[in-house]
Image (cartoon, helix red, strand yellow):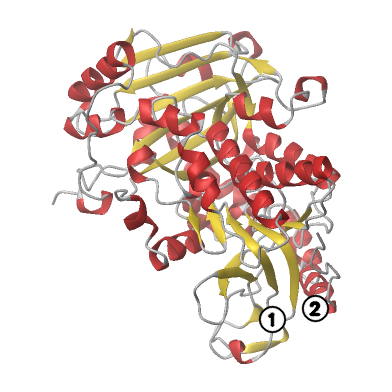
Amino acid sequence: MASFNNARPKNLQKLLQLSNHYRQPALRLQQTSAKTLSSCCKQFNSYDSNLTQSAADADFSSCGYTRCRKLCGCSRCVSPIETSAFHVGPYSSPFPVGFTSSIRSFSSSGSREEPRESMEYDVVIVGAGPAGLAAAIRLRQLCEEKNVDLSVCVVEKGAEVGAHILSGNVFETRALDELIPNWKEQSTPITVPVTEDKFWFLTEKRALPLPSPFKNHGNYIISLSQLVRWLGSKAEELGVEIYPGFSASELLYEADESRVSGIATNDMGIGKDGSKKEIFQRGMELKGRLTLLGEGCRGSLSEKVIKKFQLREQSGSQHQTYALGIKEVWDVDPSKHRPGLTVHTVGWPLDTRTYGGSFLYHMDNHQVAMGLVVALDYKNPYLSPYEEYQRFKQHPSIRPFIEGGNVIQYGARTLNEGGIQSIPKTAFPGGALIGCTAGFINVPKIKGSHTAMKSGMLAAEAAFDALSKETSQQPSMEQYWSSLKTSWVWKELHQVRNIRPGFDHGLLAGMAIAGLEHYITRGRLPWTLKHGKPDHECTEE
């Protein structure tokens, strides 16, 4: 089957030149803002004064907190966690790592009068995360197996592949085993197997051990950002085109708006007053016969698609529920480091009406990843997840792990916790939802990377079948929705469907329901619990 013409128009070259115009000022900014950055981060780490050296001694090159940005206003403070110095893709990143351009990049009503140049592909994938890259790799694998040439493009808003990936990750390799069976024979960033698995119920002074429900034997403690970079390199080896540094800001539709036909990237070079600067450049249109949206939790384009095509109504799903996860990476004393140790906790510092928990993972290189996850349906309007996390680090059973260490990276992100009750129909005219965009996190396992990757692989297989048919003028992704519901992803999420809603009734009731479901019925109860009110309606005055 013939692919679309992939010749890159001159407009894309201009866009890259425009972006590179800001590289030198950015490098100067990185050299001159260190004192300001250290000053703001001292304030940010005031709670750690008894645990760490001053923030000035830590490496904050990967600072990712919005609050830190508000304190100092420096562009460097918007750098995401776990960045690296190299870039993945046919072009290097438009901006140096750790820099956010001062170019205003959005579409204005006036700029819409100017036409945009376009590039055409068989499949356009939005988001270079685990799901998006797994989909891209699987598509190109099928092309090689069947001797079919389909063009695949991945657009990523981060400055590089992996730049916006943040996860305290104990990785289950099931999907990767299917995607790249010989991954263990390759140089992968998956090197630290889980050796100890602890589960504690915390009171203010004590840690009470509980039977661990996580079953992490055979899993690995990883940096998901590093894994995504590795997947990006594998995708490129197979012929996938990856464009980091360009966010998808707009959906494209066919003339009658009955079908998605691709995406458009941001306009660039717009002044604060909305006027066009001399360096103004229209965004690019990336047109695809199929478009896969892998934006992550509550993606802006995905929410528009869900609403436009009534995907929740079609699947009969409920609203999505969310949580906020805060993560830090510590460099600790080697004598306190236990590679392969995982610790999960529930209880203190959260009250019994608030769902959440913590994690602490001993990685390699004397590093410990730790954090707190708080469901956003909490009732107390004065609850601050950040402040609760600072209290957590002072707990007598947690503090010894990190005492004398330094914070080297930190960040935060949202998670979707709705489970199978909240998954919308994942196929729509012209494309599909994959990964955390749809919501495949297994909340009791605290894992979603393996299910996200599998969803991308299933979408790729459905897309390949649809595009390989010579008579297919409007390829459909309905096969993806059907295969998803018969896959191990659906079975896994169905087994744990009642655990998260059970905690709507409080911590003790939730733990009782979770114990019943996990150890006795194993997901075979004849009913499915419903979620309560949407998160924003749960706050009490």
Report the front residue among 484 and 171. 484
Q: Are marks 2 and 1 in contact (CB under 8 Å)?
A: yes
Label 2: how many Cα within 10 Å (few below 14, some 14–19, many 20+): some
Q: Secondary structure at mark 1?
A: loop
- Specify the quadrant of the image occupied by residue 30: bottom right
Residue placed at 60% from the left, 37% from the top? 453
Name the residue tied to disc 1.
Answer: 282
Image mark for residue 318: none
Residue 180 position in % (x across, y down): 74, 30
* Relative vertical location of residue 173 with respect to residue 83 in this rendering, above or below: above
User: Could you classify mark 1 by the number of other residues whose Cα lies within 10 Å: few (under 14), some (14-19), or many (20 or more)?
Assistant: many
Tell which residue pokes out farthest to the left in this image. 541
Where is residue 244 drawn, in percent x and y?
A: 72, 57
* Residue 150 in the figure: left or right of residue 207: right
User: What is the three-letter code of the residue carrying label 1?
Assistant: Arg
| Residue 302 against residue 132 in the figure, above or below | below
- Residue 357 image point, x, y percent: 36, 27
Q: Secondary structure at mark 2?
A: helix
Residue depicted at x 69% and y 34%: 227
* 484 horizontally vs 86: left or right: left
> Is residue 536 toward the left or the right of residue 374 in the image?
left
Place of residue 324 in the rendered image (x, y in percent of width and height, measured from the top left): 40, 42
Three-letter amino acid code at the position of disc 2: Asn
Tally the marks: 2
Residue 43 visible in rendering: no
Q: Which residue position holds label 2? A: 11
Please say if 356 is above or below 269.
Answer: above
Q: Nearer the viewer, residue 35 or 122?
A: 122
Give the CA separation, mark 2 to mark 1: 8 Å
